[in-house]
Image: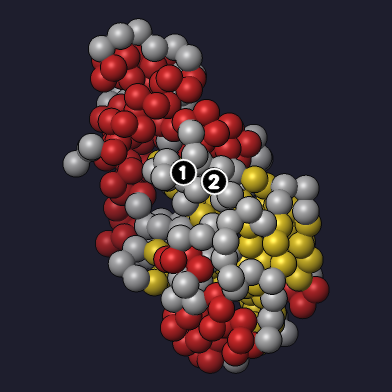
Amino acid sequence: MDFGLTALPAFRDNYIWLLQSPDGLAAVVDPGDAGPVRQALAARSLKLEAVLVTHHHADHMGGAAELAREHGCPVYGPATEHIEAVSIPLAEGADIRLPGLEARFRVLDIPGHTAGHIAFEGHGIMFCGDTLFSAGCGRLFEGTTGEMCASLAKLAALSDDTAVCCGHEYTLANLRFAAAVEPDNRAIRDYAAECTARRARGEPTLPARLGRERQVNPFLRCRMTAVQMAASRQAGKPLTNEVDVFAAIRKWKDGFS
């Protein structure tokens, strides 16, 4: 990977992902707000080559049209969602090439959070929007539990060292829930301590590593006995089917505080 990767904070807890090449070209992923992107481009003397969008929620694409107009660059996004800024619609099986960054990403369909949500994967990185978070996953606004389980399984099948570049700084809150699901999971306690220290230093907890996520993320662990037992207690009946377990812990998480 010859390009740099930076998480630009936006709004209350969003991240916009900035990719930059050594010779001053850049791309951004999920720019809900054009302001932080403009500031970063100006501060680093970068020219924007492309905008990538994972789904239609405003906090992920609200600044895309402005940036495209200002820089004359394409906007890549999901083919099945209505996003006026998107000039190059994409679905699973497509590849995108960013020549200035010498980068290539393949597109994955990952419905669940929204019906047409996509991810971009390549160079040991996945930009997964609001589908997979560190130690958590997105709410199901448009998709089914079966779709979300399949989408998470697709992402979880990538290599252990894949960098998880998601859209929000939710890690510590997610880890509190993960600890409630699996109170005896030492990996969750260790990761929570590490992430607490990062946040105390003003650092993002992201990117996360997919191998770590398989150890701590309850939504990737629905086949594990401890998670099934916790889900069964919440549901008041035995649950072993992966989709049923996911549904129970997603409902639990929705009301968790």
Furthest residue to the left? 257
User: In the figure, residue 53 lies in which quadrant?
Assistant: bottom right
SS at mark 2? loop
- Judge whether 39 appears above or below 110 on screen: below
- Judge whether 157 appears above or below 236 on screen: below
How far from the left and from the top, in percent, is residue 51? 62, 72
How far from the left and from the top, in percent, is residue 146? 52, 28
In depth, the one of 181 and 66 nearer the eye is 66
Local crowd size for mark 2, using a 10 Å CA cut-off: few (<14), some (14–19), many (≥20): many
At a point 31% along the width and 49% down the height, the residue shown is: 172
Q: In this view, does 84 lie to the left or right of 231?
A: right
Q: Is residue 139 left or right of residue 61?
A: left
Q: Mark 1 points at which residue?
A: 142
Furthest residue to the top? 238
In depth, the one of 153 and 199 nearer the eye is 153
In depth, the one of 119 and 126 nearer the eye is 119
Q: Name the residue under label 2.
A: 115
How far from the left and from the top, in percent, is residue 148? 51, 36
User: In the figure, residue 204 lies in which quadrant?
Assistant: bottom left
User: In the figure, residue 48 lies in which quadrant?
Assistant: bottom right
Distance between the alpha carbons at the discs numbered 1 and 2: 5 Å
Q: Quadrant of the N terminus?
A: bottom right
Q: In this view, does 94 lie to the left or right of 68?
A: right
Asked whether the beta carbons under mark 1 and mark 2 sit within 8 Å of each other, the answer is yes
